[in-house]
Image (spheres, grey):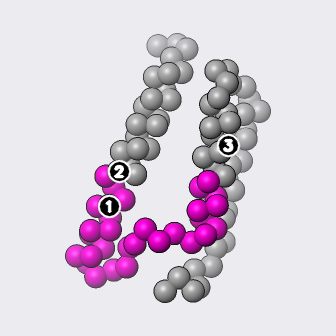
Amino acid sequence: MKNKMDLAIGVALGSAVQIAVFVLPVIVVVGWFTGREMSLKFPPVEVYLYLMSVIIVSLCLTNERSNWLEGSLLVVTYALIAAGIYFESYDGLE
């Protein structure tokens, strides 16, 4: 099972698509039944963070090789998303 990058990317992207297609709409429906506001209305900062992460991941996947610098770039991107969501204020979303 060494050097099976296609399989690893297929599993990772397949899992992400399953989450986006199935879990997010189910969470909205559960929010309706429980009376909580669980919409898909994301704050602009989160949308920019997700867009940045998609661009960085696509840049890392365009070449067929990987190195430690690209891996560290992905880890830093993950840390930026976590910090951005943690320190974001949710005032004015109502």
Q: Which residue is mark 3?
A: 56
Image quadrant assignment for residue 24: bottom left
Above or below 3: residue 86: below
Question: Residue 50 magenta-drawn?
Answer: yes
Above or below 34: residue 8: above
Q: Is residue 71 visible?
A: no
Q: Residue at x 61, y 69 (%)?
A: 44
Q: Is residue 7 visible?
A: yes
- Magenta stretch: dominant SS? helix
Q: Residue at x 40, y 44 (%)?
A: 17
- SS for tag 2? helix
Image quadrant assignment for residue 48: bottom right
Which mark is on residue 78? none
Question: Residue 36 magenta-drawn?
Answer: yes
Relative horizontal placement of residue 61, taking residue 1 as reference (left or right):
right
Magenta span: 22-51
Above or below 13: residue 82: below
> What distance separates the C-alpha of mark 2 from that of mark 3?
22 Å
The x, y position of residue 52, in whole percent, is 66, 52
* Mark toward the start of the polypeptide (2 vs 3): 2
* Mark toward the start of the polypeptide (3 vs 1): 1
Tag 1: amino acid: Pro
Q: Which residue is mark 1?
A: 25
Tag 2: amino acid: Val
Q: Residue at x 45, y 29 (%)?
A: 10
The x, y position of residue 31, in whole percent, is 30, 73
> What distance separates the C-alpha of mark 3 from that of mark 1?
26 Å
- Residue farthest toward the top in the current orientation of the protein: 2
The crowd level at tag 3 (other Cα within 10 Å; few <14, some 14-19, many 20+) is some
Q: Which residue is mark 2?
A: 21
